[in-house]
Image: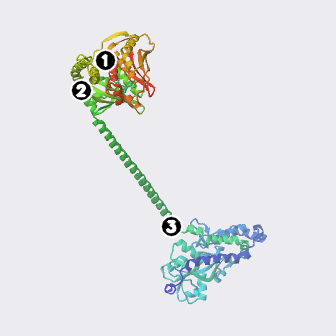
Amino acid sequence: MLINNLNNANATQQSETLHNIISWWLAFTAALLLPVSVSLAADDLLTAQERSWLKAHPDIRIAPDPDFPPIEYIDSNGEYRGIAADYVALLEKKLNMKFQVAILPSWDDVLAQAQTREIDMFGAAAATPQREQYMNFTAPHFELPGVIIVSTKVDQNLTLKDLHGLKVAVVSGYVWQELIERDHPEIELEPVPDLLSGLKRVSFGSVDAMVANLAIATHYIEKSGITNLRVAGETGYFGRYALAVRKDWPQLNVILEKGLNAITAEERSAILHKWVTLGGKKSLFENRTFWIVLLSFLALLTVMAILWWNWSLRRQVARRTAALREEFSQRKRVEQAFDNSEQRYRTLFDSASDAVLMFKDGQFVECNDAATNMFGCSRKQLIGQSPSRFSPPSQPDGRNSEEKADALITTCLEGIPQMFEWQHSRLDNTLFDAEVSLNAHTESDQRYVLAIIRDITERKRIDRLKDEFISTVSHEIRTPLTSIRGSLGLIKGGVTGELAEKTSEILDIAYQNTERLLLLVNDLLDIQKLTSGTIQLEQRTFNLAEFLDQAIIANQSYGDQYNVEYQRQPVPTVTLTADYERLMQVMNNFLSNAAKFSPQGDVIHITAEQHGPMVRVSVQDHGPGIPHQFRPQVFERFTQSDSSDTRQRGGTGLGLSIAKAIVELHGGSIGFHSTLGEGSEFYFDLPMDK
Ligand code: ADP
């Protein structure tokens, strides 16, 4: 019924009610009792008479209500505790005395024993007419307001008037019962044996409300864990608690009053705050719900932290895994590209028609398929072998293969690439001609030689065929040509009679061209003989100076044609062993070229100098010099710097290539220096006799 009547009340007022009541009451109590709180020194409190009275009564027994927290109670250790206990302890200090605490089973026992003088005083009791018959009460030392306790379903503030016609529980014999019966007979009172049973009845709804002491009620509500109760309002009554002493000991009453007066306002306030809290720190920490909520919150926080930690670890792992995967796939891509590239180069390497070999420290370390085919062996038979294993003991020029190869490789390792013709042997010792190029390269601080070998057997065969053809043709041409020249010479000489001037001119042209043609044919035959290796050198020993003088004499008429003078410089006295006629052919070529290209009236110098075991013979002119672009081909066959020049100066373009072949056949070398516009110097080096 109450719920129905009151349910429309303002919900926000509920929580504030208890707080307001306690705050007001604590402030009020402190202020009310302040005037009597006169601090007195303990020693001065009592008179001598009073002291001697105390001495005569050493065992003053105080009996608390054993179960009336927080006013007074006996705790689980059998200690006297509560507001009254703190007051009694303060009194003992201030009065310098001791009480004996008598622990009795119930408040009823306390009352009964007080009447029979088995106990002497109460720590805190409300004065009632009945109790005053056998006890003297001091002035109340603290008071607690009576409040109305209802179910939390009722959310309105109440006064006692609101309870008229309703069932209200009170602890039987407590002061509230007397007061309500007197002032509000309309309330249907339900006396209960103790506070807890009253609160339970409100909680279960068997009564509408309960009237009880504020401190005790809040204490029980908090401690008992009955969570559906709340304080709905004040009654206007106060439970005033005083010390009480057996009636026949008025002296003790006076002594206690003195003690109470000595208790300061701060001390009173401290006691009340200690036991009746406003939901401050202490009560909060004593609150089981608070701890449950706090621990649940902490547990939740821990779980969340673990989950977060897990999540962040998983994220880190995922990120790292992704990075690793990316790194891995990138590496795979690079490896793939590398594999592809290596495959490509391997294919190039293996499909090359030339043999490609690499060697280091005189051993093959790598080769391609063409190399194994060329040498007629397996890769296994080739790798680790020395290059000399695949050469005959000597080369066509008669030099030892190993020595010649060592010299070439050493020069190559010094950084000068080498290109030369070489005779190789296969695994079965059959021979073949090759063109070899050597290049050095460095890999991880190691020097390697890369050899590219081309089998030129076929080329050589064709060259031979070509040379044979030229030789045959030249031979076939030379004989009729010689006869033509002879015949023309006879006609020119007038054997057939006087010639008309015009006929004589034409005959001269024919004669000159026949000469020229014969020269060419002779040169062709020479070069064929020299390069095919069929020429036989007719060696003899002769003095160099005499040889040079002879060369000058032989060419003097040619020099006269070009109006140049040959001049020999002093030369060292050396002898040469060589094919005199062939070497003279070289000198003829040098001297005739110098005459052809020199300005009129010029002097051509012929010198000879010693260079170690060699002697260098040079022919120096002051002609136009050799154009740069032509220099590399000077010793090649049929090459001339300028075709118009050729016509002016004659020649076949074979002279120097023949000279080169002759000098090399003698184990020498040929060369030139030239400065454009200043002249040229052609020379050959030959080993001299010791
Ligand atoms: P040729 O029979 O045409 O002289 P060579 O082989 O003797 O043929 O000479 C080849 C070419 O080299 C000549 O045509 C000329 O262009 C050049 N040459 C040779 N000697 C000289 C020189 N002393 N001065 C300038 N050019 C020269």
The structure residue drawn at horizontal position 45% and vertical position 12%, both measured from the top left corner, is 570
Alpha carbon distance from label 2 to label 3: 115 Å
- Is the residue marked by circle 1 packed among few (<14), some (14-19), or many (20+) residues within 10 Å? few
Q: Nearer the viewer, mark 1 or mark 2?
A: 2
Residue 507 located left or right of residue 553: left
Which numbered marker is on residue 292?
A: 3
Dot 1: element: loop
- Name the quarter showing ligand 1: top left
Q: Which residue is mark 2?
A: 466
Q: Residue 306, how many percent across, how many down?
A: 46, 58
- Is the residue marked by circle 3 packed among few (<14), some (14-19), or many (20+) residues within 10 Å? few
Alpha carbon distance from label 3 to label 1: 111 Å
Q: Is mark 1 within 8 Å of ligand 1?
A: no
Q: Is residue 277 above or below residue 335?
A: below
- The tag earlier along the polypeptide, 3 or 1, is 3
The image quarter in which residue 446 lies: top left
Which numbered marker is on residue 353?
A: none
Q: Nearer the viewer, mark 2 or mark 3?
A: 2
Alpha carbon distance from label 1 to label 2: 25 Å
Depth check: 395 or 187 in front? 395
Q: Amino acid at mark 2?
A: Lys
Q: Nearer the viewer, mark 3 or mark 1?
A: 1
Residue 146 can be seen in this image: yes
Depth check: 643 or 664 in front? 643
Q: Which residue is mark 1?
A: 398
Do the residues bearing badges 1 and 2 touch, measured as CB atoms within 8 Å? no
Dot 2: element: helix
